[in-house]
Amino acid sequence: MDLTFSDSELAFRDELRGWLAAHHPGPEPAGEAAGLEHRIEWQRELAAAGWAAVYWPREYGGRGATLVESAIFNEELARARAPYPANVLGLVLGGPTLMVHGTQEQRDRYLPPIVTAEEIWCQGFSEPGAGSDLAALKTRAAKVDGGWRVTGQKVWTSFAQRAKWCMLVARSDAEAPKHKGLTYFLMDMEQDGVLVRPLRQITGAAEFNELFLEDVWIPDENVVGGVGNGWAVALTTLMNERAGLAFGLQVALKVLLDELTEQADQRGLLDDESVAERLGDLHVRAEILRLTAYRGLTAQMKYGQPGPEGSLTKWMWSETNQRATELAVELLGPEALATDSPWAFELLRARGNTIEGGTTEILKNIVAERVLGLPRSR
Amino acid sequence: MNFDFTDDQREIKRTARELLTARSSMGRVRAAAEGGGYDDALWHELVGLGWSGIAIDEQYGGQGLGVLELAILLEELGYAVTPSRFLSNAAAGLLIEASGSDEQRARLLPGIADGSATATLAFARDGVAELVGDADSAAHVVLIEDGLTDATATIHATAELEIEPRETVDPTRCFARVRAASPELGEPLVGTLAPGLDRAEIALAAELTGLAQRALDMTVAYVKERRQFGTPVGAFQAVAHHCAQMLMETEGARSATYFAAWAADADPEALPRGASLAKTAASDAGLHATAAAIQLHGGIGFTWEADVHWLYKRAHVDAAQLAPARVHRARVARLAAAGIARSSPAAAA
């Protein structure tokens, strides 16, 4: 066991720190669209310097970094309070999924433009009638000569208005059992029949979209992992989602907690034992999250793909982030609830944390069934 | 960065699990709790294997391995709920080795390592410690006054103390109230206490982590077997989600305890935070998981006959030793605040 960074990991970190200090993109402009353009520009700058996809192989525009270096990248980005690159879904979900299930042609074709943000990706999994029960999705893919015609509706689709490619899971065989009749496609968003409508959240912002698909064309070569194998491919994407985002999220949480601790300290609130205990509890949770994420990383380096344990860290993070924002508004008083306070947004946004990327209830089911081996629950 | 055991550490864990499964079954735990007392043959075997001196320097008769190796053993002893003076002796050894003088180390550690003159420790007020593990069989008791931050500690030969055996909720181990005729009588522990106390807290955290893991394993096995409404009760989400929660807290306790033990061996700057993380997380996991184990065993879990209550009782007594989790939580917040103040531009100027 060695919980320090090696010399080469430290060199990687220091080089990145230096680069980030010199190239920080500055504050994000207001508005969803302007913010996204800002992050696309930011990703181009990262990509030009070889920082956009550090864990990817060099042949696809990555840096060939180790998993630990990749974790360091996420930590440093959050520590510098620099935004995540715009094409996060391509970088964290789509690319890694193609590296496992894609053909060589697909990798050569799709991976490089993910890194450069030339082609933004979005994710078409959830539907109005298929949230936690993802395999119940109804979007239909009908076989036609040379490809597929897709009709249906998707929801919670970030970046849809700007995306070129959508990771789409659709029902390609209505007769098969529900987990068996699914296929994972790469759908071109720039065609007739794809309609994007913004979806406003409780924060007032429209970070997500609804997606309406009407007779949309997908050629055969855009099937990923084989017809009828969509569930397995989708699980790869979901596990990368839970494990891959953990490092950035845990540091963002730590940044938030440090900010709260500093403000509480300046107001003398840490002299109150009960405040110190509650704040300390959140620091304990955040640290444990980081340590558990690194333990998971060591396991992943030994055994390959991220395991269902990623569900644990996503669950820990979401609950701790919610508690942190709630404690913040309690300690800082009514001014934290004015909409010009960043805490007000954080408070509301955190409510989504225990829902997005797998509700806590579903994550508990996954942990119970796949880690503890309990019978399938109902 | 490698957050995993070495092959040697894995081997220690495997050997410990094997030996304790054979020699420290729940039947033995029950026998000890119901008046049988400690198993002397097992104690001599553990001493013979070098376990009692595993983290003690070789020049004092120990194995010269780290706090991490000791934590591995303690986690397994917790897992087995082994009735033993091992924990109190090991915790006192950590304190004396980290916070004693060379002369104190040379005089006291060999007896702790070879079991011939064991030691124990406890928080005390005005020379009285209400609950001291294994004081009756120890040669020395370290009494720590004034808690975690401004503590002072004195070593007492048990012959100079009033020792009154005291039953606790955990009948698997021996406790006593200890009174020093006069607090000034003891011999001060001369070094800085925090590094020693932090190591002792990690020892408690390791045992608590093992208790939590055992509670989880026994419960998962039970809810797979126990059927109600025509189905194993583990198929009900209300039950399954409790189990998932137990796993999350247990894994968190393990991450924190290994980190703290590693810090004790390799990164002194991270030790205060690490020890407080470990005691907090392991107390929470130990108390919650062992309580959930009783709940999820249903009516049978509330009977004397089921074994889950030994875990709950042991966890409570462990968590109550030295500084409780709430003290460590507040410490973590203040350490964080001090770290932020240090790293701010104003502090650098």
Image: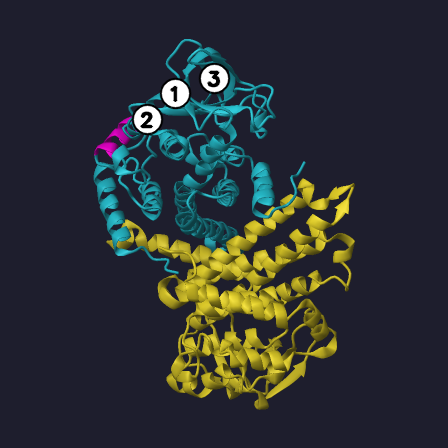
Chain colours: A cyan, B yellow
Q: Residues within 10 Å of mark 2 (few under 14, many from 20)?
A: few
Three-letter code for the amino acid on which mark 1 is drawn: Glu
Q: Amino acid at mark 2?
A: Glu
- The magenta stretch spans residue B254: no
- Residue A198: horizontal and vertical position, in percent? 45, 18
Q: Is disc 1 in contact with disc 2, using a CB cutoff of under 8 Å?
A: yes
Q: Does label 1 or label 2 sit earlier along the sequence? A: 2
Residue A211 numbered tag: 3
Query: At 41% from the left edge and 8% from the top edge, which residue is drawn?
Result: A192
Q: Position of residue B122 (x, y in %)?
A: 56, 75
Front of the two marks 1 and 3: 1
Magenta includes A42?
Answer: yes
Asked if residue A314 lies left or right of residue A258, the reply is right
Magenta region = A35-48
Q: Earlier in the sequence, mark 1 or mark 3?
A: 3
Image coordinates for residue B157, horizontal then vertical, percent: 54, 88
